[in-house]
Image (cartoon, rainbow, N blue to C red):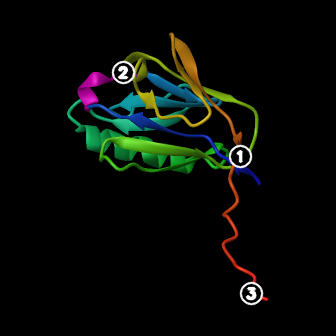
Amino acid sequence: VLADQYATGSVSCAAGGTYSDGDTLDAAGHTFEIDIGGGGVTPGNVAVVITALDTAQQVRTALLAAMQSDPTFPFSATAGDFDTVVDLRMKTPGPGLAMVGTGGFAGGVVAGFTGGQLGNAQPARFGPVRAMVVAPADTRVLVG
């Protein structure tokens, strides 16, 4: 049996002082931009409003809210198992998608992609993967 598996991944957030105004996280062509103090972001980007004093948990909450506010974002964003992590899962099958970050989002923020590629200074790639799923064995016995 072939089953579609959707790429999953996560973004780890740090304390607000790690980020500078204008740092970005680009996921599949959707750019989330750090806005320290509410001064605004580049047109077309989604604001992630934080302060330099925010905890990593508060930054995660702000990033999660920004991702969930973008109706065309191709990933479902949910709170991760750790209170500083945003988990991502593709909503529908499609071509591989890249995620890259600048400033506080550069390096080491993306992890755990199924069917993706991470490392060697390459952007993480997400995309659906087809996997073989073994059908359960039939353990019935015919008695005649």
Does residue 40 appear anywhere in the picture?
A: no
- 3D distance between C-alphas at marks 1 and 3: 32 Å
Where is residue 3 shown, x and y percent of the image?
Answer: 73, 52
- 3D distance between C-alphas at marks 3 and 2: 67 Å
Whichever of callouts 1 and 3 sits on the residue coming sooner in the sequence is 1
User: For the magenta stretch, what is the residue range?
Assistant: 15-21
Q: Nearer the viewer, residue 97 or 73?
A: 97
Badge 2 amino acid: Gly
Where is residue 45 shown, x and y percent of the image?
Answer: 57, 31
Residue at 27 percent across and 37 percent down: it is 56
Quick one: SS at disc 2?
helix
Q: Residue furthest left?
A: 53
In the rendered image, which residue does mark 2 sit on?
104
Q: Residues within 10 Å of mark 3 (few under 14, many from 20)?
A: few
Say above or below: 7 vs 106.
below
Q: Nearer the viewer, residue 68 or 137?
A: 137
Q: Residue furthest bottom?
A: 144
- 3D distance between C-alphas at marks 2 and 1: 38 Å
Q: Is residue 18 magenta?
A: yes
Residue at 29 percent across and 31 percent down: it is 14
Whichever of callouts 3 and 2 sits on the residue coming sooner in the sequence is 2
In the rendered image, which residue does mark 1 sit on?
132
Quick one: SS at disc 1?
strand
In the rendered image, which residue does mark 3 sit on?
143
Q: How many marks?
A: 3
**Horizontally, is 54 left or right of 123 in the view?**
left
Labelled pair 2, 1 in contact (Cβ < 8 Å): no
Badge 1 amino acid: Met
Question: Which quadrant of the figure has residue 73?
Answer: top right
Residue at 66 percent across and 63 percent down: it is 136
Whichever of callouts 2 and 1 sits on the residue coming sooner in the sequence is 2
